[in-house]
Image (spheres, rainbow, N blue to C red):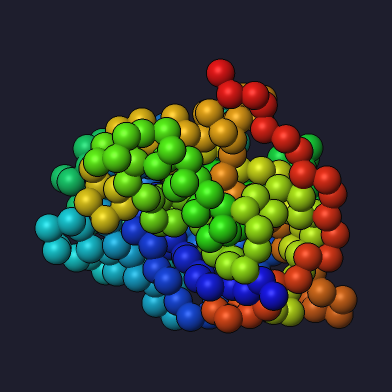
Amino acid sequence: MPQLTALHVYPVKSTYRLSPASAGVEPWGLAGDRRWMIADPTGRAVTQRDIPSVGQYRAVPHPDGSLTVTDPAGASIEIPAPSAAAGDPAAQADVWGTFFPAVEAAKEVQIWFAERLGDVRLLHLDTPATSRQIDLDHSSPGETTSMADGYPLLVATTASLAALNRHLAEDHPAGDRRAEPLPMERFRPNLVVSGTEPWAEDGWRRIRVGGVVFRVAKPCGRCVVTTTDQETGERRGPEPLRALGRHRRFGKQLVFGQNLVPERPEGVTGDLLGTLRVGDEVTVLEEAPRPRPDARG
């Protein structure tokens, strides 16, 4: 039986992960996931694509909504959660050309980040229930997400990672750095599932994890962040994008993992839809034939 073997939450978009034993599920993602982001002066998200060292910042959320953020050198700052209701400065956030309202953190917080990362600011999403509609090609009106790239959650499987690592070993000579197996952390999933066949997730349409049901919205196209060592911030060369291009190309996308949208259980009216726990069983409720990757170039 497939089971959930890891949970990952990223309190600030593109920063270092937290890996709790359990996490609440809200309509827009795991509780506390990507409710903050670093942005340039126009409000556009600044991520590891732009500055790889962003991934070395560690954020710890607190029950009152505040954060403690620690930079790669070990210096920390306490960040109260701003809100529009409290009169904090409003901002227009931009994630991949999707614009939505956010709120700026306090001035001293902006100075702290600017001293380290250049002309940036820290934004908070205080109204995820109404702020950011998911792409309507893969959602229904009223389904929203956080400051993630596009969808509430991302799932990946250990069997597919093992298959990808076999491709790396086959594609490069022994001893070549590019043949080294990659850890799952390179792909920054929220849910990691074991006990499946390789690429089984390509055929999933609805799954249940523990007591929470998710719709599989679309495959996840990968980018340069996957080439960045999440422990050091170092860009490590063309892999895994080269291998994904050879073995996992679907049209214009290099695919690893699937994007998920949680379903609201009958009778549940609040923000908390359920709780996931490492070790939960994963059941495939609906599936379809798996698409075949394009022939390698």
The residue most toward the top is: 297
Residue drawn at 50 percent across, 53 percent down: 161
On the rendered image, what quadrant is the C terminus found in?
top right
Q: How many marks?
A: 0
Residue drawn at 48 percent across, 80 percent down: 21
| In-image side of 57 versus 168 (left or right) | left
| In-image side of 285 versus 162 (left or right) | right
Please say if 121 is above or below 252.
below
Residue drawn at 18 percent across, 46 percent down: 116
| In-image side of 46 versus 149 (left or right) | left
Q: Nearer the viewer, residue 122 or 11?
A: 11
Q: Position of residue 266 (x, y in %)?
A: 87, 76
Q: Position of residue 131 (x, y in %)?
A: 64, 51
Q: Position of residue 55 (x, y in %)?
A: 31, 51
For residue 1, which quarter of the picture? bottom right
Residue drawn at 67 percent across, 26 percent down: 294
| Residue 240 makes an appearance in the image | no
Please say if 185 is above or below 284.
above
Q: Nearer the viewer, residue 209 or 174?
A: 174
Q: Position of residue 270 (x, y in %)?
A: 73, 76
Q: Nearer the viewer, residue 141 or 280?
A: 280
| Residue 248 makes an appearance in the image | yes
Please say if 28 is above or below 102.
below
